[in-house]
């Protein structure tokens, strides 16, 4: 039986059109291949299941659009992919950089890689090599499988011959052999069997072969590299876990071994704590909050142009001056700062929108920050003034009052018995400093907005945790710029590095794209182990390990940052109005500049503030504060959260879209 070869089907998986995707398209045209293009992982799988392509080319140069390894695994998880050749397009590396290992690509299911080259000729040559190498081998394997399936079901005598009708001995059958299948009936008449549609009925075998020209040398290098890896003494915890599971599989029943295989697949991914976010067709508020707060922007606009927004530079910094004694009225207000019900908005009004400096002095004094840093109160005052002047008072939400509110919540949490028993003084100081600077120079726009607008900050931080990286970096730049406000000038270098790292880690933890990761790690590493045993020295060991202290500090500042729904109702309502106004202003500006609108529900003419608050509480707040309450014991906060949720629900039930119910008619 000879195969009549149809044109090879090629699927290009490129998130955006560029010179590389065009080069492969024209190379396919020159080679006479049929070509499809998919822009997303989902459409790639759907197209492949429909067409059963022999070759798939996946763009692996820009992981911000999709993870190429994840796309490859999705396709390899389908049965028709077992004989498909999958090619990874990888970025060029500078000559001074070491060539990366191909092992991760092979483990993900790629057959080979192609270093980016937008020359049509280079792409054509690559496609022709693959056709004459891996693809033809796969055709022969499929042909053999079809033949052997036919042989198994044939009830008559069968001869396998060469093209010259020379009978071939049954074992072994070479995949490269040209086969003619002849079935002998009573009349001894020969009837060749027609090969069935290879795309629908073939059972494929997966190939991970390298380039045919250099496969032996590559294989040898691979084996020697693997041998070196196994001989290394450095072993990560996840590697130990995988090795334990592999060992357990050897003596396990088949069903258990298969289950462990699925466990290993999950463990080998890099997104262990990222949830699979199901779409909520009936809840656009949740969808927009997730999209606006947990993504780094849509980036691609119509056409190939990026829109650049106005420069989001920092505000002019006021020269620090020595504060007079705190006025009695403000001092009296600050006497209540240890209570959760402390009214930060009253302090904002009394201090003429400078609550951070006054509250900071009070809290930092009570925690002995000056003594720990070995700095004077005058230096601390200058630093607090410097940080406060770097917040934008024009922002309705992300201003120094929000920073003061987060500082107040942080101090409140640090005074809770179990939190205090888990952290040392350096942790406490780091938490207070991180809370103070965590939104410094915030422009009143989200990360998604800055990325879509191509702002200088987004370019500087590669569209990754843009604002949080800026807050942390600017805080240290401003602090060390002038000795008068440098609160770190007298501490030991090693202590400074430890403190600096803790502050940076906490500020970065306020970025929402890793929200579920931080909460999941806290629950699984701290809450669950502590719940399983009684309150003993063992639980103290769980809390006090360096790794878990890190998780506690991240959880602490995350909860402090979004504690508005747990405040007394009047404060909760005010904060809801302020954040909504900031989102409305962003939507207005996105429309003016022709940018993608990342949170369409926050249109000031149509938005339901109660619905947005309900979605925010349901999706981000409830689970996180349940976990934090289980650790820190915060019954008062949980009661406020419940009352506030009922308030927003009652407004929503009345079809009211504003902050407060309409006045009685």
Image: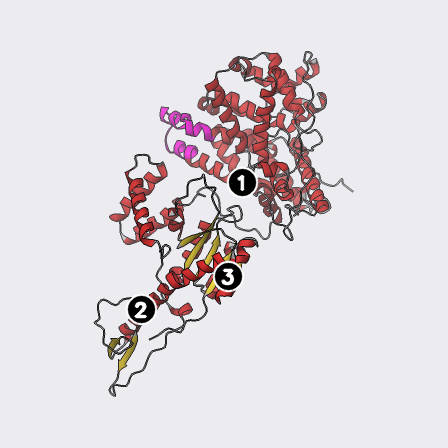
The residue carrying pointer 2 sits among few (fewer than 14), some (14 to 19) or many (20 or more) residues within 10 Å by Cα, namely: some
Q: Position of residue 143 (x, y in %)?
A: 34, 69
Considering the whole magenta stretch, tell me its main secondary structure. helix
Instruction: Quadrant for the N terminus, please.
Output: bottom left
- Distance of mark 3 from mark 2, alpha carbons? 30 Å
Q: Which mark is residue 603?
A: none
Residues in magenta, as a range: 525-551
Q: Residue at the spot x=29%, y=44% of the render?
A: 224
Q: How many marks?
A: 3
Residue under label 1 = 513
- Circle number at residue 144: 2
For residue 73, side relative to residue 146 (left or right): right
Q: Marks 2 and 1: CB-CB under 8 Å?
A: no
Q: Height in image: 349 above or below 565?
A: above
Q: Nearer the viewer, mark 2 or mark 1?
A: 2
Q: Quadrant of the C terminus?
A: top right
Question: Marks 2/1: CA distance?
Answer: 49 Å
Closer to the camera in the image, 245 or 367:
245
Residue 427 visible? The answer is: no
Q: Residue at x 27, y 75 (%)?
A: 162
In three-dimensional space, the C-alpha distance between marks 1 and 3, rounded to whole angstroms, equals: 39 Å
Which of 228/546 is in front?
228
Q: Is residue 41 above or below residue 1?
A: above
Q: Is residue 658 left or right of residue 373?
A: right
Asked if the stretch drawn in magenta spans residue 547, the answer is yes
Of the image marks 1 and 3, the number of the one nearer the N terminus = 3
Residue ID for mark 3: 27
Relative vertical location of residue 476 with respect to residue 240 in this rendering, above or below? above
N-terminal of the two: label 2 or label 1? 2
């Amino acid at each position: 039986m000879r195969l009549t070869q149809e044109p090879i089907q090629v699927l290009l998986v490129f998130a955006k059109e560029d010179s590389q995707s065009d080069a492969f398209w024209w190379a396919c045209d020159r080679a006479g291949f049929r070509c499809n293009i998919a822009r997303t992982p989902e459409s790639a799988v759907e197209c492949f299941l429909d067409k059963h392509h022999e070759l798939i080319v996946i763009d692996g140069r820009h992981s911000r659009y999709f993870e190429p390894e994840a796309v490859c695994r999705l396709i390899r998880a389908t049965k028709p992919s077992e004989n498909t050749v999958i090619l990874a397009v990888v970025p060029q590396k500078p000559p001074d950089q070491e060539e990366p290992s191909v092992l991760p690509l092979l483990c993900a299911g790629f057959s080979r890689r192609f270093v980016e080259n937008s020359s049509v000729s280079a792409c054509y040559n690559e496609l022709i090599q693959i056709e004459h190498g891996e693809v033809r081998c796969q055709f022969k394997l499929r042909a053999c499988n079809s033949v052997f399936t036919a042989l198994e079901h044939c009830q008559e005598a069968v001869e396998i011959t060469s093209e010259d009708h020379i009978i071939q001995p049954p074992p072994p059958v070479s995949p490269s052999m040209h086969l003619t299948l002849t079935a002998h009936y009573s009349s001894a008449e020969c009837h060749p069997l027609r090969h069935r549609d290879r795309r629908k009925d073939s059972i494929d075998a997966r190939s991970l072969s390298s380039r045919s020209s250099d496969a032996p040398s590559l294989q040898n290098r691979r084996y020697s590299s693997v041998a070196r890896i196994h001989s290394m003494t450095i072993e990560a915890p996840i590697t130990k876990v995988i090795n334990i599971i592999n060992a357990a599989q050897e003596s396990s029943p088949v069903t258990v071994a298969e289950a462990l295989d699925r466990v290993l697949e999950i463990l080998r991914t890099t997104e262990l704590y990222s949830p699979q976010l199901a779409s909520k067709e009936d809840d656009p508020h949740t969808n927009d909050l997730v999209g606006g707060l947990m993504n780094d922007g849509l980036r691609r606009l119509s056409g190939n142009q990026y829109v650049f927004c106005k420069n989001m530079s920092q505000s002019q910094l006021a020269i620090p001056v020595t504060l007079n004694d705190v006025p009695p009225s403000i001092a009296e207000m600050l006497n209540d700062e240890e209570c959760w019900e402390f009214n930060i908005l009253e302090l904002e009004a009394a201090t003429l929108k400078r609550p951070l400096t006054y509250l900071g002095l009070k809290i930092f004094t009570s925690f002995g920050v000056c003594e720990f840093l070995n700095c004077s109160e005058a230096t601390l005052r200058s630093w607090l003034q410097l940080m406060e002047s770097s917040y934008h008072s024009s922002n309705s939400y992300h201003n120094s009052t929000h920073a003061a509110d987060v500082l107040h919540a942080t101090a409140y949490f640090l005074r809770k018995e179990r939190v205090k028993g888990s952290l040392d003084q350096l942790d406490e100081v780091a938490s207070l400093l991180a809370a103070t600077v965590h939104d410094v120079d915030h422009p009143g726009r989200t990360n998604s907005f800055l990325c879509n607008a191509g702002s200088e900050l987004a370019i500087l931080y590669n569209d990754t945790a843009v604002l949080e990286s800026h807050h942390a970096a600017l805080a240290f730049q401003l602090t060390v710029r002038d000795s008068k406000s440098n609160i770190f000038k007298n501490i030991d270098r090693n202590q400074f590095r430890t403190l600096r790292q803790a502050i940076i880690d906490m500020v970065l933890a306020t970025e929402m794209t890793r929200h579920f990761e931080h909460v999941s790690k806290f629950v699984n590493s701290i809450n669950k182990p502590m719940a399983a045993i009684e309150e003993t020295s063992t639980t103290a060991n769980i809390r006090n390990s360096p790794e878990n202290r890190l998780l506690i500090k991240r959880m602490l500042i995350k909860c402090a940052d979004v504690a508005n729904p747990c405040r007394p109702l009047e404060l909760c309502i005010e904060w809801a109005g302020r954040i909504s106004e900031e989102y409305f202003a962003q939507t207005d500006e996105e429309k003016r500049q022709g940018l993608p609108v990342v949170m369409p529900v926050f249109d000031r003419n149509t938005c339901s503030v109660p619905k947005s608050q309900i979605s925010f509480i349901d999706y981000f707040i409830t689970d996180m504060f349940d976990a934090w309450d289980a650790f820190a014991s915060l019954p008062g906060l949980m009661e406020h959260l419940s009352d506030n949720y009922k308030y927003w629900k009652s407004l929503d039930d009345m079809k009211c879209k504003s902050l407060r119910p309409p006045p009685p008619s």
